[in-house]
Structures are given as structure tokens and as C-alpha cells.
Amino acid sequence: MEHDNTGGTHLLDYETELDRERKHLGSIREHIERQIQASGADIKLTDDFTELALNVLRTKEVEQLRKSRVRPYFAKLDFLEKDQPYPEQAYIGRFGLYERSTMEPLVLDWRSPMANLYYEHSFTDVPVEVKRGSSLRFDVDRKRQFEMENNEIERFFDMTAASGTNRLLLERLQQRGEQKLRDIVETIQAEQNAVLRADARQALIVQGAAGSGKTTIALHRLAFLAYSYRDRGTFDNFLIIAPNRLFIDYISDVLPDLGIEGVVQTTWEDCLIPFIPLPKKYRFTDTSAKTALFLEHGSSGKAGLPHKPETILQASRLRGSMAMKKLLDDFIDKRVGQMVPELDLVLSKAHRMQHREIQRKFHTDFRHYPYMQRRKRLLTVLKQWKEDCLKEAVQTLESRIKQGEYAATERRVAEVREQYRRKFEEYCEKVKGVEIASFYRNIVSKPANIAKLIQYAGADFAHYDAERIAAYFADRKETHPYELEWEDIASAFYLSYRFYGLGKTKSYSHIIVDEAQDFAPFQMFALRLLSSGGSMTILGDLAQSIYPYRGLTNWDDLREGVFETAVSIERLKKSYRSTVEIMTAANRVLRHWDNPHITPAEPVLRHGDEPKTERFASEDEAMRAVAALAERLAHGGMPNIAVIDKTVAHCKSVHKKLTGLGADARLIAGKDTRYEGGMSVVPIYLSKGMEFDAVIVLNPSAAVYDSSRPEDVKLLYVAMTRALHRLYVYHWDELSGLFDSL
């Protein structure tokens, strides 16, 4: 930091100040080039282990320096520490820069404690934690934000307590959408900053409104944790759970930009299924059929199903409750108690191990191991005991043969060996193992067990039909003998965890779960078993919990039994994605869902066009209008456009018609792994978490969206809040009553 005894520079002419800042930028870049050369020269070929480790650090330092070349910093602070005589200045960038000889900071890392002065709303008496429980206080005179183009400072914006306007944020919000999510280190807001710097020693739930930056803040939180705990080595492996592979591609550029590497990014099912020891012929179904069943209007009366949709829904929601864990624990404990028979292992009259001794080995000596590992260790110990006994028996037998007590020799020894082998194998067969799929299916296909599960689940599940739910599981066991459902993953994983453990897998330092409102408590508990001390950040929006057969309507459901430590809940209410006009329209739709746990999003002061509703004489006429609109928007600087419909089937039909009209449209249907930008035709549920320059909601008719169904309310809310700048509603049938206030 550099001292400024001039009392500030706010009286200087803007152009003079701009020239001064450009010269400073040049000096910092010269410093970076010198550092790159010096650090690169230190990297040498060696076989020494210590030097190899240092080479890794030097290589990483050079890489960060190279990333800092173009934009070494994005802001500058003028501040004064309380009770100190001189004001100071500090530049803030993505990575810290130091003068090697003096270790004097030239640029502060955005994750450093002092950077809080930039991110906090307040300008006076701002606390900065220098160590846990100890803070210094500062007054900030000015926050300067830089806009750079073509590697040069183009302009700067000054924020003071008097002005309070975050010009850089407004500039960013006006920009068009990109194909990939980008980092926001320059424009992190105070409420977002509080979330990303929250205590990592417990689970954090973030209820974030649509467009509040939940996902981006979660990724920045990983960068913050890696930086803050870099000297302790406690936060060095991370896991991100994303809703689908397409979303992983969408966020893929953020972590490298922040300098974070080696983060595992996967989906919930892809993370857990590898831990489940099932035969190769088994498979887990995806959720596409069930999603189509429950998200299509009128599915409750769909004909041709062997079971009522209400029964399928109840079976799904029960498997997501923590009552499922309690039921499985009952049967696990029962099976473990039966694993070792109450029988002595008798090889001969001379060699007997009493069952109490065997039980002690299994339940006490090996108690720290998962049950199937205990079984394996027990059988290994018993086998060694058998070999020792056999050796002793053979020696005794051979001694007697030499003394003339037995006429036979080799034949008698072989008989003893066979006797010990047979007795041992007969006993081993009685030491029960477990096959996960059959063990689980035998539990859930019995009405008495489902009745017990409903009892464990509590009053909210009391009306569930145990007979029909058990019949559903029994029927699937019969008709799909090698197929388990997506909702079975948590149970199968938990059984695998209890019986087999996690093998050599290292617990994750921190786990990020995005779109968490779509996971049930037991599914979240399964993930928690992979975390180190329950350190997790769980992000979602209850207003976007669109699946009736799974998910949450209240975050408090995760407080009971899921985590061993306290759980904190933070709320991000401000929406930065959509204009005020778009968010106001979306909030009017959301009001049709009566949920006391939902708080409407608060759009920031960025205005745009009112959402436009237009009716056409036919679907073909609407398709021609969509194609023409997309072309106009693309030529007007809005290339990333989403045509959103309710189901995959409808989207396939729309895509076919649009491409038939010559439109360059891409269909997103569920198996996609890359987002290419441009014009996309996408079902609502796959658009969650994404954003587009413009959104065209297609034919949200009264026949398709029932204003009395919470799922339909939330689906339209999700669709509308994908739009950054423009929202269109094109229809040819009568509009849903959900639009009655537009």
C-alpha cells in the first residue's frame, strides 16, 4: 500500500488523473514481466523432491502472473485506518502482487481481508478481520473502478459515500449475455460478499432469488476458501454438484479464471452411483419419464399406467425423507446382528473357536470398519486360525503315524485336510454377506415396512397408502428386475456406505450443491457423507422447486437429522439478471403460489422494455414470428435467445418447425453436454440456472398451465426469469390465468 499525504486526489482534473492511472498500470505491468522472468528462471530440471515441489509452486506463480498481465487490477481504494494519521491507497485485483525484495503489496488479492473495504456498502467504520475475533476499523474515502479495453484503462468511475452509485455494476448489467458464465469479482455486492466469506466449518444454505448470482457466488466461495486456508492445507479438494452436464459446461470457465484447479464437477447421480457395488446388469433410470409424467398438465389422470401417479409420487417422496434412513438403519442393524451365527467354529474335537470369541472379533475388534470389511477381516482371521489348526493337526497325525499308531499315511493326512476345509467353508457360508439391490428391494416391497416408513415420516405423510406403495415397489421388482429408479440412489448409496464404506476416497473439504431445492433431505444427507465435517454450501430457490415428486418447499427440512452441526441460512433477495419490468412480471405470476417461505425477488434499478404478449391465429404463424424475431434480436446484438416450452416433446416439435423455416436453432433435450449459445429451444426444467439475452415463452395456455397448480406457477416463473433484457410471450391458444395481472 502507498501513503497519500495529499488529502486525496478527487480535486484533480479527470484527464490528468486518467493519465496518472495509465502510467501506474504501465509500471505494474513492467513489474509483472520482471516477476515472470525471475520466477521462470528459478524453475530448473531437478530430481530433488523439495525442488520439484517448489517448481510446482513457481509454475503456478508464473501462470497467475501471466493471467494478471492484461488486467492486473480492477479497483483502487482510498482509506484511513482508525486512529492513524495518514490515508492510504490500495489496488485490488484477481491475484495479489508483491514487491519481492520487501514483500510490500502492490495489488491486493480480492479474497484478502482488506478487500472487504471495497465490497462492503458502508464507507465509514468498516471492520476488517485481521485474525479470528480481532478486527481493525477503517473509513473509506473513495472506491475507484476501472474499465479497460484493448489492454488500456479506458475510463474510471469513482464511488463515494455521497455518490453511492455503482457505475461499473450498472455497466455490467447492461451487457449482453455470453455463452458461458463469467466471474464477477469486480462487482460482488455486499450481501453476496457475506455469503462467499461465511464460516466454512458448518453447512450454509443460501436461499437466492432468481438472478441473485447464487451459482457465481458459490464458485467464488471456493476460490475464497482455497485462498484463506492455503497455509493450513485443510481446503484443498472440492466437489461441485450441478443439475446436469450442460450446466457444468455453462460454468466451466469461472474456476480457471479465478485460479482454482482440480475441482470435481459432476451431477448428484454420477457422484454417488460409482460407490454402489451392483452387478453390471443393473442400471439406474434417469428422471426424464417421471419428469414428463408430472410436469405435463393433466398427468394425474394419465391412462395406461399400472399405478396411479399419486402412488408414484408418494413412493418418490417417501424415499427422499429422512424416515428412509431410519427404516434402513433398522434393517442394517438387524442384518449386522445376524451376520455372525451363534455357532462355534468346530474343525475337530481338538479345535473349536467359541462363537462368543468370534462375535467379539467382529463387533469389538473390527468395530471401526464398515460391516462387509469386518466380515472380510473376520474370515481372513478365521482362515489363518484354520490353517494354524490344520498344521498342528497334521503334525500330530504324522507323529502318530511314525509311532505306528496308524497304518495309513498320505490318505489319512488328506482326509484331515479335507475335513478342516469342509468344516471351515460350511461355517463361512453361515457368515452372511449382503447384496445391496435385493436387500433394499426386499425391504420396500413389504406393506408392513412401508407402513413403518410412513409412521417414521410423520403427520405430513400419514395419508399415504402403504399397500399401494409396497405394490408399486413389488411390481417394479418383478417387471424390472435389474432396474432401479433415480430415487433409489440415495438408499442404495447409504446401504453401500454402511456395509462397504467409501474405500480409499478422500472426504471433500467443501461441497457446493447448486439447484438444491430439487433434492430431498435424504438425498442431501447422502452427499453430506462425502464431506469433511459437513462443510457444504447449499444453494437454491424454493420458488424454482418445480418437481412435485421430489425437492423442497422449506429449507428447515434440512435442519433435522441431515447435518450433525448447526446449519445457517442466508438470503439473497436482490436480482441482478433481469430488468425491473421482467422481474415485476415474474413476481406477479409467482404470487399465485401461496408459500410463506417465499420472498419475491427485488430487482436492481435496471429498466428495459416491458414484456410483450402477442397472440397469433395459428401455431404456424407463431413459428414464423419466432424465427423473424430471433433474426432481428441477433442483428440487434442479442444473439443468445431461448425459445422455452413446457416439455421435451413440445420442444422437439417446435425445433423441427423452426429449422424447417431456416432458423439456426439448437434443441436442448436432456443429454446435452455443451451450451453453444445462439438460438436454443429448451424445456423449462433444463433452462434452470441459465440466462439468455431474450426469452420467448411459447404458448403458455390455460390448457397447459393451471393457475391452481404450484408446479405450473413455478415453471412459468423459471421460464420468465431466464431473460436478461427482453421477454416475449407468443401464443395462439387462450393464455393461462397466471398472466391475468400482466
Image: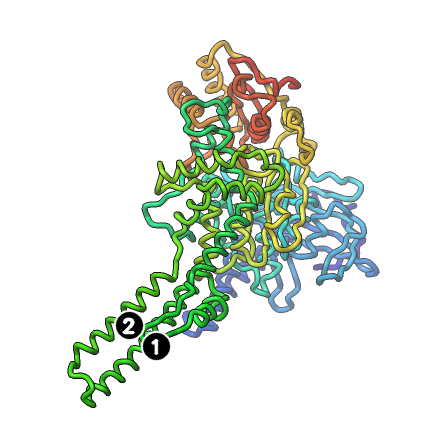
Image quadrant for the N terminus? bottom right
- Residue 526 at x, y = what percent? 52, 50
Of residues 653 and 191, the one drawn nearer to the viewer in this rendering? 653
Q: Quadrant of residue 65?
A: bottom right
- Kindly identify which numbered label has been placed on residue 222: none
Mark 1 or mark 2, which is nearer the start of the sequence? Answer: 1
The local secondary structure at tag 2 comes to helix
The local secondary structure at tag 1 comes to loop
Q: Can you say whether 388 is above or below 641 in the image?
A: below
Q: Residue furthest top?
A: 617
Q: Residue at x 63, y 44 (%)?
A: 206
Q: Residue furthest bottom?
A: 403
Q: Residue at x 64, y 53 (%)?
A: 24
The residue wearing badge 1 is: 351
Disc 1 residue type (three-letter): His
Q: Residue at x 59, y 38 (%)?
A: 552
The residue wearing badge 2 is: 420
Asked whether, in this view, residue 260 is left or right of residue 133, the answer is: left
Q: Can you say whether 617 is above or below 536 in the image?
A: above
Disc 2 residue type (three-letter): Tyr
The answer to the question of whether label 2 and label 1 lie on touching residues, with beta carbons closer than 8 A, is yes
Q: Can you say whether 634 is above or below 625 in the image?
A: below
Count how many numbered circles sit on residues in the image.
2
In this rendering, does residue 182 appear at all? Answer: no
Category of crowding for the residue at label 1, using alpha-carbon neighbours closer than 10 angstroms: few (below 14), some (14–19), many (at least 20) = some
Q: Residue at x 56, y 45 (%)?
A: 323
Category of crowding for the residue at label 2, using alpha-carbon neighbours closer than 10 angstroms: few (below 14), some (14–19), many (at least 20) = many
Q: How is the image coloured?
A: rainbow
- In 3D space, how far apart are the residues under numbered discs 2 and 1 (Cα atoms)? 10 Å
